[in-house]
Image: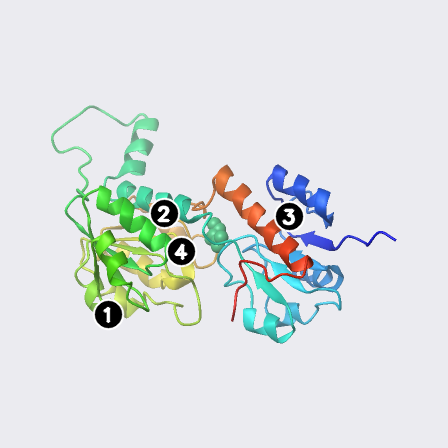
Amino acid sequence: MPQAKPLVIVTRKLPDPVETRMMELFDVRLNLDDHPFTREELCQAMAEADVLVPTLTDRLDSTVLSHAGPSLRLIANFGVGVDHIDVASAHQRGLTVTNTPDVLTEDTADMAMALILAVPRRLVEGERLAREGNWTGWTPTFMLGHRISGKRLGIVGMGRIGQAVARRARGFGMAIHYHNRRRLHAATESALEATYWESLDQMLARMDVVSVHCPHTPATFHLLSARRLALLRPHAYVVNTARGEVIDENALVRMLSQGELAGAGLDVFEHEPAINPRLLKMDNVVLLPHMGSATVEARVDMGEKVLINIKAFIDGHRPPDRVLP
Ligand code: DGY
């Protein structure tokens, strides 16, 4: 008798080639109209699936996880960040959690670098002005921004993406500084020509641009608190392509509106998809709708990782991208 294929429930629309491959391999329930799952739909999916493929828009807290049915064994997240999943609670229930690291590193680093360039050079402000027909001609003092070459970049979180940003920023002539839970190996540090700061506070007080690249965990929630943001100098810029929750967004908005910071480039927000309306009125911020990994290549590769993890698990092997609590 042929064995029944495992039921894989996918909570959002995935790139076509990924969905096609999934349908070849598994019994798949897709989200055809790509609506965000309600809590009830998530609980229902937990109860019915053998494998759940959620994304960062699904909050899998302990209550939702408590609806896991007897056949659910694997949560194969489409994405690297797992702050929307209570991984410890999943493990207690015997559920394996996987994610999709590596394949979005370069694209996310590109987006961070784009913001590091765009904000000090007033790229979006200038584009808006030109598009609105408000350009009256070149003058020596028109639309002056600030040079990034020779400036100090402070990277908060020097994992894969932080290091990829460091490599790019070196190419633009920036001096690389970083704070990380663990100091990098000497060889990596010297290849990146990066200076380590054990004290985040001390680093922040000396940087021209700060770029956030740590995951959101209970330990990093509001890591850039009002107190720490106040350590930044008024000419400093803040860039965040990691998670909105790492920065106290209200404090950031307050400082930007009071001229205590030069500007910010934000691809992520504390209450996505809501954006603080005060930010919308500011010229010195660039706001993006969580697009760091939004390339066809990254999203197809992320889907491929999800497939590899599911296949390994079903074949009785350890999935390559297991997330431990
Ligand atoms: C992730 O994978 O966690 C990213 O934030 C998606 O862009």
Pointers 2 and 1 in contact (C-beta within 8 Å): no
Can you tell me whether the CB of the residue at mark 4 lies under 8 Å from the nearest atom of ligand 1? yes
Q: Circle 1 — which element?
A: loop
Q: Circle 2 — which element?
A: helix
Q: Position of residue 55 (x, y in %)?
A: 57, 54
Q: Position of residue 209 (x, y in %)?
A: 23, 53
Determine crowd level at label 1: few under 14, some 14-19, many 20+ residues with C-alpha closer than 10 A. Answer: some
Can you tell me whether the CB of the residue at mark 2 lies under 8 Å from the nearest atom of ligand 1? no
Q: Position of residue 252 (x, y in %)?
A: 31, 59
Determine crowd level at label 2: few under 14, some 14-19, many 20+ residues with C-alpha closer than 10 A. Answer: many
Q: Circle 3 — which element?
A: loop
User: Which numbered disc, 2 or 4, marks the residue that appears first in the sequence?
Assistant: 2
Q: CA distance from mark 2 to mark 1?
A: 23 Å
Residue, disc 2: 109
Residue, disc 1: 198
User: Which numbered disc, 4 or 3, marks the residue that appears first in the sequence?
Assistant: 3
